[in-house]
Image: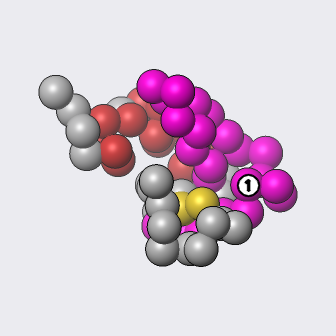
């Protein structure tokens, strides 16, 4: 997982911002992993092409 934020924050993989999972309402799940975003825009971008941001496309 994302260790660089010390466990309290998650990284918005689209724009690179740190996001507090307890405060954001922009959340999606992909392959049983929860992802958090700073905005609806980032969430939409991720959902269009999740593999692009995860970097694990097969
Ligand atoms: Zn963002």
Residue 30 image offset from top left, x and y in percent? 49, 29
* Residue at disc 1, CB closer than 8 Å to ligand 1: no
| Residue at figure coordinates x 69%, y 67% from the top left | 8
Q: In this rendering, would 26 be left or right of 29? A: right
- Residue 28 lies in magenta, yes or no? yes
- Of all residues, the one furthest to the right in this rendering is 23
Residue 19 is a magenta residue: yes
Using the rendered image of the protein, determine whether residue 41 is visible from the camera's viewpoint: no
**Apparent side of residue 42 relative to residue 24 in the rendered image (left or right):** left
Can you say whether 29 is above or below 12 in the image?
Answer: above
Q: Which residues are magenta?
A: 16-37
Residue at 65% in and 58% down: 38
34 vs 5: above or below: above
Instruction: Return the residue nearer the eye: 47 or 3.
Output: 3
Helix, strand or loop at disc 1? loop
Which residue is denoted by mark 1 in the rendering? 21
Residue 55 versus residue 1 in the image, above or below: above
Q: Can residue 56 be seen in the rendering of this structure?
A: yes
| The quarter of the displayed image where residue 19 is located | bottom right
Left or right: 51, with 12 as reference point: left
Check the image and tell me how it is coloured: secondary structure
Using a 10 Å C-alpha cutoff, classify the residue at mark 1 as few (fewer than 14 neighbours), some (14 to 19) or many (20 or more): some
Q: What percent of the width, then of the height, locates residue 22?
A: 82, 55
For the point 52% across and 27% down, the residue is 32
Give how far across and how far down residue 37 sits, in percent. Answer: 62, 52
């Amino acid at each position: 997982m994302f260790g660089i934020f010390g466990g309290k924050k998650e990284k918005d993989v689209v724009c690179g911002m740190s996001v507090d999972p307890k405060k954001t309402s922009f959340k999606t799940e992909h392959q049983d992993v929860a992802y958090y975003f700073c905005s609806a825009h980032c969430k939409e971008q991720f959902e269009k092409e999740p593999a692009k941001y995860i970097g694990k496309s097969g």
